[in-house]
Image: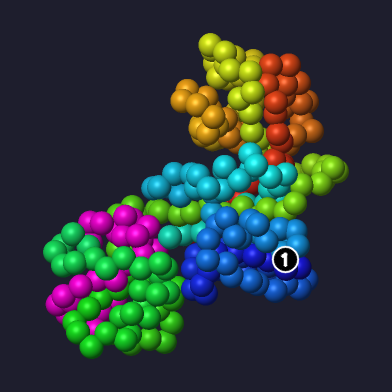
Amino acid sequence: MRIATLGPAGTFSELAACEFGRQLNDYTLAFYPALARVLKALPQDADLAVVPIENIVEGVVSPVIDTFVKRPLEIVGELSIPVRFSLVANHAQPEKIYAQFVAQGQCSDCLGRYNVPIMNTASNSEALQLLQQSREPAAAVVPEHCLGEHHFAHVEHDITDYAHNETRFVAVREARDEHEAPKTGVNYKTSLLIIDDTDHPGLLVEHLQVFAAYRVNLTSLVSRPTGQKFGQYHFYIECEGHRDDTAIRAALTLIQLRNKVMVLGSYPTAAPSE
């Protein structure tokens, strides 16, 4: 199984991809520099793509949601990865700090205490590499799991602004006509898109009322602009249950009378991260 994910090595995406890979008998991992490139690898250069879809602090990952509108893709699994960063330095009083821009936003409280310039990097791995090459007093924000056997003059562990920060990842493949039937004893989640092709007043309220009437519990609702004109949006929705559940099938049947619906997949709900 060929798995594509966001690189370089050392990212949280690599952790997630390896976790999915361990569920398979055999896999190879390929890194790509951008989320769009990861998903574009399907199906020619990869059988599975592992991408972040939501962070507790930052919210949904818009490029991933938008790609679902443009391409026939299917979500086949999800998992959550704890997001823990450390600040490492070659001196107790660094004069600059290297940090990937997302990491900077998630560790702003700690970085604000240093009152030194933040040097943005393309990745967490690059931040660590620049620190190791620096001859000046410097620091870097790096994922906890990247510390390994490295030795630093100064280390601050778990510097994220939110103690329980985590990112949810999904495994994606090219869409197929058939789908797996639900297994007994498994809790499922279903992802879908409501395509705004017949915009009218009350569109979203109508759909929410349908889900409520059939007692379908929504766990996520995100609006994304269609890119056609202001005021038009597609809706990405996640709900508890499998697409074959009677309630979900009935709700989608009614919604499809007014708008196009793309079911992106039903998959086991991720276990809580430790």
Task: Tell me, yes or no, whether the highlighted magenta stretch contains residue 32.
Answer: no
Q: Is residue 224 above or below residue 5?
A: above
Give the image location of residue 89, x and y in percent: 25, 79
Q: Residue at x 68, y 21 (%)?
A: 259
| Residue 200 seen by the camera | yes
According to the image, label 1 marks what residue?
45
Q: Residue at x 50, y 26 (%)?
A: 229
Q: Residue at x 61, y 25 (%)?
A: 196
Q: Which residues are magenta?
A: 84-110
Tag 1: Cα neighbours inside 10 Å, few (<14), some, or many (≥20)? some
Secondary structure at numbered mark 1: loop
Compared across the picture, whether 131 is left or right of 165 comes to: left
Q: Residue furthest front?
A: 228
Q: Residue at x 19, y 84 (%)?
A: 136
Frontmost residue, 31 versus 181: 31
Give the image location of residue 91, x and y in percent: 19, 83
Looking at the rendered image, the quarter that the N terminus falls into is: bottom right
Quarter of the rendering containing residue 31: bottom right
Quarter of the rendering containing residue 257: top right
